[in-house]
Image (spheres, rainbow, N blue to C red):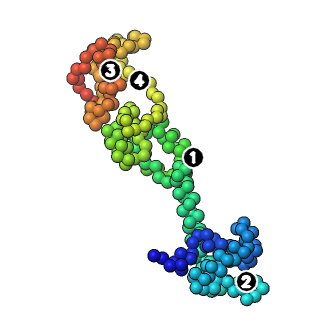
Amino acid sequence: MTNGREDAIDLRRLTYFVAVAEELHFGRAASRLDIAQPPLSRQIAQLETDLGVLLFDRSRSQIRLTQAGTVLLDHARDVLDRLDRIQREVKRIGEGISGRLRIAFVGSASYGVLPNVIKTFRSAYPDVELALSAMNNAELKRTVIRREIDIAIARPSLDDDELKSEPLHHEPLILALPDTSPLLQEQPIYLTALKDETFVLYPRKPRRDAGHRRIQPSAAGFARMTRPRCSR
């Protein structure tokens, strides 16, 4: 159990006390607090009773702070200022305009739209700390599911029921051919024309979905064969 003295200094009484201590007038303090004067006087008197000290010297025409009142005023201002900062900081974090955002991305994204996105975000939210790290797609999927990062910028997209994805940028699919290839004479070049060509793709590990999910060989009329691959 707690006694009355331990519960004496609540935030409302502390706010009332600071107003009276700064105004040194109960009437002006009451107007500042937008309350009637009698309840304010009772709250201050009760605070003094609970603390067992006089906070104001009322023996003169104008009230004055006692030594105990001066000490309490210094601490009360500090407490109320700290509380105000805490409330504002928590509110800013809740509104997304402050705090820390952990973003991981595939390395190739740093050569595309990502730098401009980061620059724009930092201009709009200068108080948000950005923690940036590069990963491959397999690492991105694992860390975002584990909540170790907040946002994953993947290429291609990550498909998982636990994730919500939004397209950030659309890129055309580019076909690179030797300058001696007869396909250069064809316009346009259809996928079926590539059935006898050797493809250079990402390895299945760790980017298991990087190449073969985007190109469906069987749909184009040719079967998958083991070919030399370019590995990182």
Which residue does the image show at 62% across and 79% down from the upper left?
46
Q: Earlier in the sequence, mark 4 or mark 2?
A: 2
Q: For the residues marked 3 and 4, what is the alpha-carbon distance in whole angstroms?
A: 14 Å
Which of the 4 quarters of the picture holds residue 57? bottom right
Instruction: Judge left or right: residue 21 versus residue 188.
Output: right
Q: Which mark is residue 63?
A: 2
| Mark 4, residue position | 173
Relative height, residue 165 to residue 37 (above, below): above
Which residue does the image show at 62% across and 73% down from the upper left?
13
Which of the 4 quarters of the picture holds residue 9? bottom right
Q: Amino acid at mark 2?
A: Ile
Q: Earlier in the sequence, mark 3 or mark 4?
A: 4
Asked if marks 1 and 3 touch (Cβ < 8 Å), the reply is no
Question: Residue furthest toward the left?
Answer: 226
Q: Which mark is residue 216?
A: 3
Q: Amino acid at mark 3?
A: Gln
Q: Amino acid at mark 4?
A: Leu
Q: Earlier in the sequence, mark 3 or mark 2?
A: 2
Q: For the residues marked 3 and 2, what is the alpha-carbon distance in whole angstroms?
A: 87 Å
Task: Say if residue 70 shows up in the picture.
Answer: no
Q: Nearer the viewer, mark 3 or mark 4?
A: 3
